[in-house]
Image (cartoon, rainbow, N blue to C red):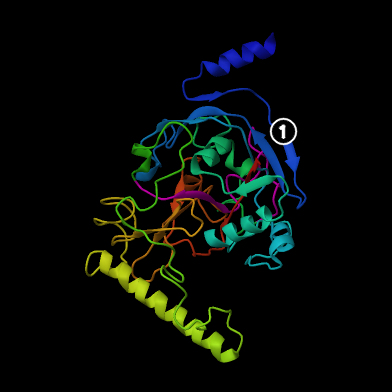
């Protein structure tokens, strides 16, 4: 009877509802522990009465997480990273410290290695909405507890990361989700996305909202036969000279396709700084100036990549959440977002935690 009353009370809350209670702790073969999070809804963005919010943390909007998910109990550690990648990029070394100095691409490489093990789960970064839902753990206040008790930040970190799990967890058993290091999420960035976010399971802005769709196959090799420089018989290159010729042909092909992409966008397009029309975040948004081009992926599943027309490389502003050891209290709020120029950026206060789904 008491549990039913508790559910009724939760269901009546206007800002945060949990559909079912209880989280289960789980561990995979790499020693990564997960906490099972139940579905529910909450108000995402700037908390009521918070005067320290940035513009991109508004408008406050209702989000519904419709499916349970398992999220990392801790940030990925250097020992876990090394066990999979056989390297340790972290600036502040320590096996039980969070791995950092990893770009979003690096995190995706780590995830691909885990998924290649075929352990019955698919691993991925959390969406921004999943991250905030789990981080809030039922609260609508700027913080999930006393900062000194739950977070390593500017006032107590001594300007360095710390081993995971030394501070108190939030109400759902997640450690260091505030403080220690910022954490990559899967979404791309748009300063205005909160104003148009769907209610159910938002995944961030779609790639290339203002771009040109260039169809006809992937960049590498291109449509219409083998790359220039391939042996005339179609057999794989065998001699050293044939290998050199094929590589030269592929470089030439890539240059031609890059020029084609440049021709398809506005003349004079250039990489820019913050703001201005044509930026990824929309007019006035904090984005890369100049139009982008969407190119179909080679996997045939209809996916798209955001391509910079100047250098031909994948782009799109990544989002990190959670604050970091060098951040003041004002920048550690549960609603705070951090955006960076390009997914290859590495900083000593950015790491990540995982979500996994059963196949």
User: Toward which corner of the image does residue 276 lie, by quadrant?
Assistant: bottom left
User: Residue 62: where, in percent of width, then height?
Assistant: 43, 29
Is 8 magenta? The answer is no
Q: Secondary structure of the magenta portion, mostly? A: loop
Is residue 84 something that shows in the picture? yes
User: Would residue 189 be counted in the magenta stretch?
Assistant: yes
Marks counted in the figure total 1
Image coordinates for residue 19, horizontal then vertical, percent: 58, 23
- The residue singled out by tag 1 in the image is 24
In the orientation shown, which residue stands out farthest toward the top? 1
In the rendered image, residue 354, in percent from the top left (x then y), is placed at 62, 48
Q: Is residue 89 left or right of residue 215?
A: right
In the foreground, 340 or 51: 340
Q: Is residue 197 above or below residue 32?
A: above
Q: Which of 266/244 is in front?
A: 244
- Mark 1 falls on what kind of element? loop
In this view, the residue in front, 14 or 159, is 14
Instruction: Residue at 75% x, 53% y: name it.
Output: 30
Horizontal and vertical percent position of residue 110: 63, 59
Boundaries of the magenta span: 162-191
Question: How crowded is the residue under tag 1: few (<14 C-alpha within 10 Å), some, or many (20+)?
Answer: few
Furthest toward the left, the residue is 267
């Amino acid at each position: 009877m008491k549990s039913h009353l508790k559910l009724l009370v939760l269901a009546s809350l206007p800002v945060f509802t949990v559909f079912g209670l209880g989280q289960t702790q789980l561990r995979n073969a790499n020693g990564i522990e997960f906490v099972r999070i139940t579905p529910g809804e909450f108000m995402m963005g700037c908390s009521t009465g918070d005067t320290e919010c940035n513009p991109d943390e508004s408008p406050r909007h209702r989000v519904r997480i419709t499916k349970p998910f398992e999220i990392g109990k801790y940030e990925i550690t250097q020992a876990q990273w090394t066990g999979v990648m056989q390297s340790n990029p972290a600036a502040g070394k320590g096996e039980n410290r969070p791995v950092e100095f990893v770009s979003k691409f690096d995190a995706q490489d780590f995830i691909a290695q885990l998924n290649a093990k075929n352990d019955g789960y698919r691993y991925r970064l959390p969406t921004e909405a999943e991250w905030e839902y789990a981080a809030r753990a039922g609260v609508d206040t700027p913080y999930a507890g006393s900062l000194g008790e739950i977070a390593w930040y500017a006032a107590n970190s001594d300007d360095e990361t710390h081993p995971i799990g030394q501070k108190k967890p939030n109400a759902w058993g997640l450690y260091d989700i505030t403080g220690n290091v910022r954490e990559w999420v899967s979404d791309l960035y748009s300063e205005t996305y909160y104003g148009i976010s769907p209610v159910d399971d938002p995944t961030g802005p779609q790639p290339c909202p203002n771009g040109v769709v260039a169809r006809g196959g992937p960049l590498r090799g291109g449509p219409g036969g083998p790359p220039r420089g391939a042996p005339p018989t179609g057999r794989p290159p065998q001699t050293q000279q044939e290998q050199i010729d094929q590589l030269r042909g592929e470089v030439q092909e890539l240059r031609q396709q890059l020029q084609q992409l440049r021709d398809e966008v506005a003349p004079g397009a250039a990489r820019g700084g913050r703001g201005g029309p044509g930026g990824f975040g929309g007019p006035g948004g904090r984005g890369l100036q100049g139009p982008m081009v969407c190119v179909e992926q080679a996997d045939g599943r209809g996916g798209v990549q955001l391509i910079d027309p100047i250098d031909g490389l994948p782009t799109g502003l990544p989002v990190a959440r959670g604050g970091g050891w060098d951040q003041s209290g004002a920048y550690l709020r549960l609603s705070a977002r951090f955006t960076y120029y390009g997914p290859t950026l590495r900083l000593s206060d950015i790491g990540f935690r995982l979500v996994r789904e059963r196949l």
